[in-house]
Amino acid sequence: MTAQRKVWGDTLLELTREDDRVVVLDADLATSTMAVTVAEGNPEAFIQVGIAEQNLVGMAFGLSTMGYRPWLSTFGVFLTHRALDQIRMLVSQTGAPVRIAAAYAGLLNGSSGKTHQDIEDLAIMRAMPGMTVLAPADEHEARAITRWAAEHDGPVYIRYARDAVAPVFDADYVFHPGAVHRLRDGGGDVTLVSTGVQSSRVVEAAELLAARGVDARVVHVPSLKPVDGDALLAAISGVGTVVTVEDHSVINGLGGLVAELIAERGDPDAPRLHRVGLADGWSESAPNAFLLDRYGLSAERVAEQVLEALGHSPSPSATVTVTAPGGTVG
Amino acid sequence: MNLTPPQRPSTDELRLLADTGRWNVISTVAASKAGHIGGPLSAMDLLVALYFGQLRIDPAQPRHPERDRFILSKGHNAIALYTVLAQRGYFPESELASFDHGDSRLQGHPDMKLTPGVDASTGSLGQGLSAGAGMALGAKRRGLDAHTWVMLGDGELGEGMVWETVLSAPRFGLDNLTAIVDVNGLQQYGWPAGESDRFDRSEPLGHVDLGAVFTGFGWTVHDIDGHDFTAIFDAFDAAEAARNHAGRPSVILARTAKGRGVSFTEGTYTWHNGVATEEQLRTAKAELLEKGEVR
């Protein structure tokens, strides 16, 4: 297993060697984001801007007008929040080919706590006109998405996870914007829809459910925008219950996207939707295992919430006693 | 083709261009029934000097890769930029009438995707200098001799992002970057001055030694009268002479009067924006176009 941030640094180094228009601008977190790989491997392509995220975005925009294809290196939370206005006016409104590499995305960021946990980025970036919003599942998809984004002629926002997860794709995976992927077939009982590295844990949850006699399909959505709505609806059709699971607020992220699609279709036989993710509250600093359990995103906790959604009585073997502020919001 | 500096017009010619520009501002805003006056008028002499006497540009090739760049960071003064771009030949002056209307290339704030000659979209204050630093860095990396000019307002210096760029630009050795601060001493509302308030407002940066601040951050400072064309060009020449030599960016602190050139707008914060009445338009026209020298 390889962490997405390492894949990003390695792939970016390759890209800078292939194309001298590719540069990375860092806001002093290169050793965390792994832009340090470029700094050491191809110093010409590495631009240190300092601890100044707004200037990071502004200078990247300026460089883009001079023919460069800049990538941003810092924690995602500082891009989607502190530099939001700069992304809005200088990147989104101009369509500049700036690649917003959101490092340490989502809940799991090395025990930094709620200040650094970006659980609103998908909602914010999804609403940004013209922004491509991507969340790769594993190392292979992270590599493919990085390479795709390098070629894309417009702004791209990409979530990169700090820590490695069990891969769900093969090394020869090819990314197509908008496509959705069935990671697990079947699904007589429930369809689980996920995005980013959470999809890996959802595959694991489906196996736990199978052991309890529940047949779950798993659909991975790497491309929050654009998204092939028809393909996503087709992927979740024919099953009475859909559970979205995301390393993000349940408001306006993946769950919001699926809710919009179902509601717009107006199908009276539409599946019942349950959204699993961070409820309307903040998290805390703790090791990954604690956070995944507390906020309902571990394979075990996802499986439990699916069983609840399906109306199964709690398993006597379930030992989780924490009352989570995260979890299904009906 | 190589771009060359323009032949500088005479001071009288520049004054005529600037006063015509001021009339275009006040009359266009009156026609569109919304827009800014005070800042466009304080900046007009600087803009005319830049576009008619300094920038290496070609209106027939607005995207010429070797051109000098100009960013109006105080984007709410767009109408001032539009009138000078029109006078310079980027689009017909008659198009000014479409300002702020639907389907117009002349948006309320500059849009690089729509208006020929606009090098960066601005409007949210504080971002232009950073964009300019990126352009100047890109020019250096590309080996282009282009110079990047960015105009900010003094009130705009309240935006924190400005200082992120002021701090970092010298580190990149951006001697091909020049900031022009239109120090007109007023902003939209500002700080009421109590009993001494003359219905105007105290200077937003009255307590700040701007020259010392920029010098302290590693910039070369030129402190000038922003309505004196000789002083303006002396500062422009010094900033240009620094390119590829000084290793540090330049800032021109241009002391100006808000609402400059029209009796009822000059020196007051109340004309930050506004729509002139018919009578005021007659007054402005007489002062700008029909009396010759008004100063």
Image (cartoon, rainbow, N blue to C red):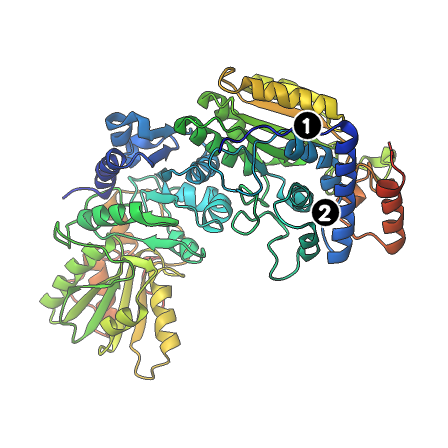
Query: Label 1 is placed on what type of residue?
Result: Arg
Say which amino acid is labelled 2: His
Q: Is residue B116 left or right of residue A138?
A: right
Q: Residue furthest front?
A: B1
Where residue A2 sits, quadrant-wise, is top left
Q: Is residue B12 visible?
A: yes
- The residue most toward the bottom is A268
Mark nearer the viewer, 1 or 2: 1
Q: Quadrant of residue A308?
A: bottom left
- SS at badge 1: loop
Where is residue B111 drawn, in percent x and y? 56, 49
Most foreground residue, B174 or A252: B174
Residue bearing mark 2? B36
Residue B144 is situated, as x and y percent measured from the top left of the image, at 44, 28
Residue density around tag 1, few if under 14, some if 14–19, many if 20 or more, within 10 Å: some
List x then y, in percent, for residue B247. Answer: 49, 17
Q: Is residue B84 left or right of residue A188?
A: right
Q: Earlier in the sequence, mark 1 or mark 2?
A: 1
Give the residue at the far top of this rendering. B245
| Image point (32%, 31%), residue name | A30
Q: Toward the viewer: B177 or B154?
A: B177
Query: Observer-nearest residue: A315 or B155?
Result: B155
Q: Would residue A33 appear left or right of B247 to someone viewing this image?
A: left
Where does residue B216 sit, x and y in percent of width and height?
Answer: 57, 17
Residue appearing at x 28%, y 56% in the figure: A322
Name the residue at 48% across, 35% down. Answer: A55
In the rendered image, the quadrant that contains the C terminus of chain A is bottom left
Estimate the spatial distance between the alpha carbons at disc 1 and disc 2, rounded to whole Å.
Answer: 28 Å
Residue holding disc 1: B8
